[in-house]
Image (cartoon, grey):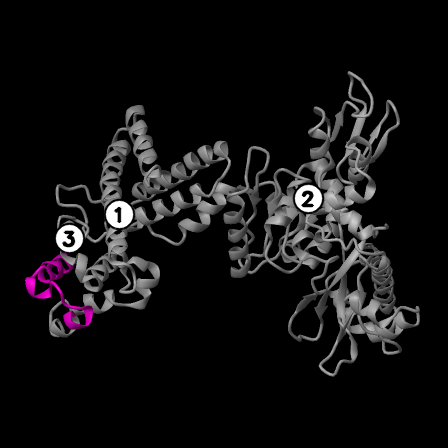
């Protein structure tokens, strides 16, 4: 049975041969390369060199060489077909093992994609590509760069791509399966890319698997990619990684930007270790792929609002994946500036200086998230502290979790102290009772729980009335609801009775679908006993946080006046208590 090169390359790109050999023998790193004692003959000094980029190994002692398939056939005694089956399952690459038709089709697809790329490139030499050539000139791309990245144009007034491929004796089915054409609503075959600047997209081995296309006449969408298929899966690909991987290995850094033009422009300016997701948000698979070539890639997305949001999304996603050997860095560009524009407006030297000052993952998350709160009152401090706790809980690696927790808390408390020193907010240090309205929205959920569940109303009211969480108006309402006449009334009946009540607005705000969505236990459709349990649990947690925050504020006040080791340890102790809640 035969297999297509595309299938085998996909498997090799998804399974690290280094990791596989590490199961059998100890690996030693020499510079950027890894060596091991050959698994095929006895030796004490490592003479087997591993090339993870190409998925191959070579022993200078006995001459053994091969790839991941060789390890399974020669070392594990699989036959080749079984080795492919086993590795395809491990890698998630789907292969049709029924007949050779799939193999032949995939080889045809590879040939079609190569010829299509050549056709796109050749079109730049025709007058019909003037609009494309003008755009490339405007973007200051040299002929060498255009050729290096095999840029092209998807229009030729003399012949379209479909007819060109038909002249090469490919069938309609083969051309359609390659995704360079599509069927329109009348079932007629049309070129998939029409009058667009074309960016060939390669897999890690440098073979073309798809294309990206940019409109040049202002039409939407601005960018499109080849449709998803078994040979083109965007979540597993990074644009330009086939070129950037060797530079990334040498420098142990990989710059991840947003778009094709960013990559091409930076490459032309001598920055070779740079890649991009394919017009979509960076996926977990793409991040794992980047980590194969650098343990500290750097995210540099555009400085507009969508770029900042995309960067933050990557940061949050990365928290659950980081480990002592996997880091992530971030560079924030000025507002509405992309890497190419930065170089043109500021200079290449300034850009290179910026590259040397990335923010570590923890600092980037803190810098971005802290902008959403002012920390001017107790409510915001508690909310933000809880948000940091939730982020820390997503970290799976224990060692990373320990240090990230300390770093986040340190940044948080330093921010509070800095605000205090600069008098950006007033800290109240008096003997009055603590601020009662800790979280207005959650308080409304508690009141909704009382109104919507008459069977547990009195029991919940007793607990709530003993808490300092509620402000005076809310407490007055709770005392009113304690009246016997409300014992068994429904929420609608209570609403009618309190229609002219001074606190009727609190009642109406509580009985809101928005509150139910945020706190499902407050909904009238929720089981009363479960509602009671969850409401009281939330109340207990908020009371505990209030108590701990009082201690923090007291310690901070003393710390600012007379800093000493004991007070700092006290802060750390309280910090751990808050972190370990729940």
Q: Give the labeled residue for mark 1.
A: 537
Q: Main secondary structure of the magenta part?
A: helix
Label 1 or label 3, whichever comes before in sequence order: 3
Magenta span contains residue 82 = no
Name the quadrant of the C terminus: top left
Element under disc 2:
helix
Identify the magenta region.
Answer: 471-494
Furthest residue in direction front, as rendered: 98
Task: Indicate the position of residue 53 as horizontal and vertical percent values.
Answer: 76, 40
Q: Give the labeled residue for mark 2.
A: 90
Q: Taking 196 as reference, is 424 above or below it?
A: above
Rate crowding at label 1 as few (under 14), some (14 to 19) or many (20 or more) other CA atoms within 10 Å: few
* Residue at the image position 25 percent from the left and 52 percent from the top: 535
Task: Indicate the position of residue 63 as horizontal and vertical percent values.
Answer: 88, 27
Which numbered dot is residue 153? none
Q: Taking 31 as reference, is 409 above or below it?
A: below
Q: Give the labeled residue for mark 3.
A: 459
């Amino acid at each position: 049975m035969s297999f297509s090169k595309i299938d085998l390359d996909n498997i090799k790109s998804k399974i690290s041969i280094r990791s596989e050999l590490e199961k059998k023998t100890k690996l030693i790193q020499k510079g950027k390369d890894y060596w091991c004692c050959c698994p095929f003959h006895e030796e004490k000094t490592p003479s087997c060199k591993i090339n993870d980029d190409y998925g191959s190994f070579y022993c200078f002692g006995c001459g053994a060489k091969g790839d991941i398939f060789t390890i399974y056939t020669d070392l594990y005694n699989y036959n080749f077909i079984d080795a492919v089956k086993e590795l395809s399952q491990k890698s998630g690459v789907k292969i049709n093992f029924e007949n050779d038709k799939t193999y032949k089709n995939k080889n045809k697809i590879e040939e079609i994609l190569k010829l299509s790329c050549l056709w796109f490139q050749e079109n730049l030499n025709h007058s019909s590509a003037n609009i494309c050539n003008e755009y490339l000139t405007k973007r200051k791309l040299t002929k060498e760069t255009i050729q290096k990245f095999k840029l092209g144009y998807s229009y030729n007034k003399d012949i379209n791509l479909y007819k060109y491929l038909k002249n090469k004796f490919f069938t309609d089915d083969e051309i359609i399966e390659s995704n360079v054409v599509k069927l329109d609503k009348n079932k007629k075959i049309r070129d998939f890319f029409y009058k667009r600047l074309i960016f060939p997209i390669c897999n890690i081995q440098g073979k073309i698997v798809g294309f990206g296309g940019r409109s040049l006449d202002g039409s939407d969408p601005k960018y499109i990619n080849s449709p998803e298929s078994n040979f083109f899966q965007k979540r597993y690909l990074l644009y330009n990684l086939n070129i950037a991987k060797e530079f990334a290995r040498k420098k142990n850094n990989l710059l991840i930007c947003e778009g094709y033009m960013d990559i091409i422009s930076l490459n032309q300016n001598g920055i070779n270790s740079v890649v991009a997701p394919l017009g979509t948000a960076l996926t977990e698979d793409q991040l794992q792929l980047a980590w194969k070539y650098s343990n500290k890639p750097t995210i540099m997305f555009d400085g507009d609002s969508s770029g900042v949001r995309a960067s933050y999304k990557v940061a949050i996603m990365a928290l659950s994946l980081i480990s002592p050997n996997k880091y992530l860095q971030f560079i924030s560009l000025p507002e509405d500036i992309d890497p190419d524009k930065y170089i043109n407006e500021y200079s290449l030297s300034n850009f290179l200086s910026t590259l040397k000052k990335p923010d570590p993952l923890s600092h980037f998350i803190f810098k971005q998230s802290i902008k959403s709160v002012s920390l001017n009152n107790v409510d915001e401090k508690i909310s933000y502290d809880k948000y940091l706790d939730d982020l820390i809980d997503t970290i799976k690696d224990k060692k990373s979790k320990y240090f990230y927790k300390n770093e986040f808390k340190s940044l948080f408390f330093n921010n509070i102290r800095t605000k205090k020193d600069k008098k950006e907010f007033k800290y109240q240090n008096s003997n009055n009772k603590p601020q009662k309205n800790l979280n207005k929205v959650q308080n409304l959920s508690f009141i909704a729980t009382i109104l919507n569940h008459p069977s547990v109303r009195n029991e919940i009211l007793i607990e709530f009335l003993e808490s300092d969480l509620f402000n005076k108006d809310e407490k007055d309402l709770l005392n009113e609801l304690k009246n016997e006449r409300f014992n068994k009334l429904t929420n609608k009946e209570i609403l009618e009775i309190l229609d002219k009540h001074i606190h009727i607005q609190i009642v109406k705000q509580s009985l809101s679908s928005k509150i139910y969505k945020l706190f499902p236990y407050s909904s009238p459709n929720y089981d009363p006993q479960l509602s009671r349990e969850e409401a009281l649990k939330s109340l207990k947690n908020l009371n505990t946080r209030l108590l701990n925050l009082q201690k923090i504020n007291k310690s901070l006040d003393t710390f600012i006046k007379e800093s000493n080791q004991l007070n700092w340890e006290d802060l750390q102790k309280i910090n751990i208590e808050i972190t370990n809640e729940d």
